[in-house]
Amino acid sequence: MIDVWNILIQQPMINLLFLLYAGLFQNFAVAIVGLTIVVRLLTQPLNRQQLRSTKAMQELQPQIQALQKKYAKDREKLTEETMKLYRERGINPLGGCLPLVIQMPIWIALYQAIIQVLGSAPEQLLSLFQFIYPPLHDLARQVIPINNHFLWLRLDQPDPGLPLLPFLPILIPILPIIVVVTTWVQQKMVSVPVSDPQQASMTQTMQWMMPIMFGWFTLSVPSGLALYWVTSGLIGIITQYFTTGWGGLRPKPTPARAARNERKREKKPRG
Amino acid sequence: MEFMPKPLALTLPFLLFLAVGCGAASGSGWSSPTLAGGTLYVGSVGGRLYALEAASGEELWRFPTEDGHPEPLYARPVLAEGLVYLGTFAGRVYALDAATGAEVWRYPREGSLGGIVADPLIADGSLYVPSSDGKLYALDAEQGTLKWQSTTGARIWAGPATAEGLLLVGSYDHRLYALDPANGAVRWQFEAGGAISGAPTAEDGLVFFGSLDNKVYAVDVGSGEKVWEFPTEGWVWSMPTASGDRLFVGSLDHRVYALDTRTGEKLWEFTTGGPVRASPILANDLLIIASAEGVVYAVQSDTGERAWEYPAKERIGQILATPVLGEGVVYVSSYDRMVYALKVQDGSLVWQIATDRAPATPSPQGS
């Protein structure tokens, strides 16, 4: 099983990373960005299916909310009617999850490839030899050791932060902050409005918790991996935008805000 | 139906996996054992240095003790003047009392250097410590103070050697440097085709070393000129062993080569079942080879013919550390957190001991 994983996924990814590193100015950060783009392109059919599913779910929300109002006291009936609605529209409610599950091994392989090629610990570098395709041996010979410096980062170490505040001797962790923002934006874009207060509160909590968790992990993982998260997140945001627009990121008109807007509109002609 | 949390919940295990994976990225260590005065000093995979009674495997002391924080060990412990010197991957050098394991000094006192992977060298009262930060540090062996430091272009994961009044050290910048031991000034440098990850060996005016360009090089110590090179089919990470007109060197291509030291001509090769990172060691007419597959081989040094292998059928843990030779016994440290004492004559087990347990306990013969 491990051999199959190595031959089919791990090995091609490691060799591709080597090629990208050699071809893209021997800059490992650029190679990581390049590999993330390549992997994103290869998994595009899966992404597209996931995005479509999100879009369909978002479009269906008015009907679902109507059902939730109608069957507020009968959860069993609500479930039954919701499922019926999905069937009628040909939507699989798990359609958005499956591509995510399939992509997970690819993400894991990407992470492993980055760590392996950086070879910061001797075991990683030692075992790297068996992964390199013989035609690339000569290339590997030339480029090892991989230059792991990029701007203020050492790609095999967590982001040390930058002293961005002129009057305070505090290091601001740049990558973790970007990861939090990109993850939050992505979460928000794919979110589907819900009327059930309990469910809405849970969704809200998750929308904050996940980016913070990602950011927290970024504080301790190699910044090369964080760079992958940022790149992947940005690509995700762009592709999501072209499929569903800003989605859940658009501010929802609350009754109070709607009334305020209405008053403004009324005042304007008089002014 | 509650849709939102599903993709999120699916992401959680992924994150946890990453967290576990990241923890494992720091490395475990492959410190080679050292033998001195009937005591075996061996660094464990768990980051502790053990002093064991060589005859029985009985534990004498460990460093750090149970309260201390272990640091990954790749470098071989070095002994001189009643002190044992230990370089750690956390970038610290410790001088310990060889009899008790008590810390005498540490360098640096605050902070750390780059991770120490290569074996330090002690010569003329100086301790030479190569570091992943690309520097070679010369410390006063008694006081633990810095005498000088010399910078190369990349990490130094190969231990230094001395020959003809020069200090020879290879770097990942593909160069072998010949330094003045008094001040670290560069006398000459030789550029190989790849990073140098194994320590050099000097004999009769030549220095031999391997490189990640798959080659073994012989360079003239006086001039820094190449005398010959020998191609293998894998990275040469192990330190060559020289004896008379023979040079024995392991490669990650699973083979050990016996070469003529003068010409680089191949005399024989022996194929194991895994990469050979550990240096082959000579025990009279036998050459002991530790293969990463988890097997120790003994072959006739003049023909390469197999004499014995341990274990005969099963495999022990991965062996990346160079074994050490005692009186008729060879000591092997393995990734299965065991130390094995084998008879040189026939490869039979004298004792084995499990490290990273409290307390380490020997079990005579068999498991």
Image (cartoon, rainbow, N blue to C red):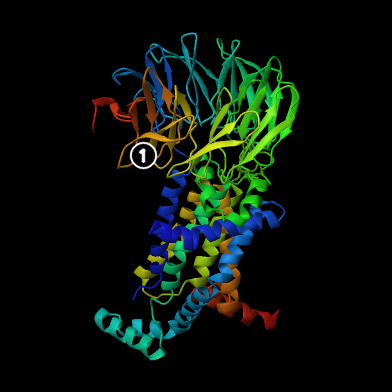
Residue A176 appears in the picture as rendered: no
Q: Is residue B344 left or right of residue B132?
A: left
Residue B312's image quarter?
A: top left
Q: Which residue is mark 1?
A: B317
Q: Is residue A69 left or right of residue B200?
A: left
Across and down, in percent, residue A66 comes to: 38, 85
Query: Residue at point 71% right, 79% down?
Result: A271
In-front residue for pair B204/A211: B204
Q: Is residue A125 above or below residue B66?
A: below
In-front residue for pair B39/A43: B39
Across and down, in percent, residue A48 comes to: 52, 77
Q: Is residue B240 above or below residue A205?
A: above
In-front residue for pair B132/A263: B132
Picture mark count:
1
Q: What amino acid is labelled 1 in the image?
A: Gly
Across and down, in percent, residue B155 comes to: 62, 35
Across and down, in percent, residue A206 comes to: 42, 62
In-front residue for pair A64/B111: B111
Q: Quadrant of the C terminus of chain B?
A: top left
Q: Is residue B361 left or right of residue B63?
A: left
Q: Secondary structure at mark 1?
A: loop
Residue A157's image quarter?
A: top right
Chain letter, disc 1 residue: B
Q: Residue furthest bottom?
A: A88
Residue B350's image quarter?
A: top left
Q: Quadrant of the N terminus of chain B?
A: bottom left
Q: Is residue B51 left or right of residue A48?
A: left
Query: Residue at point 30% right, 42% down?
Result: B314
Residue A116 appears in the picture as rendered: yes
- Circle 1 residues within 10 Å: few <14, some 14–19, many ≥20: some
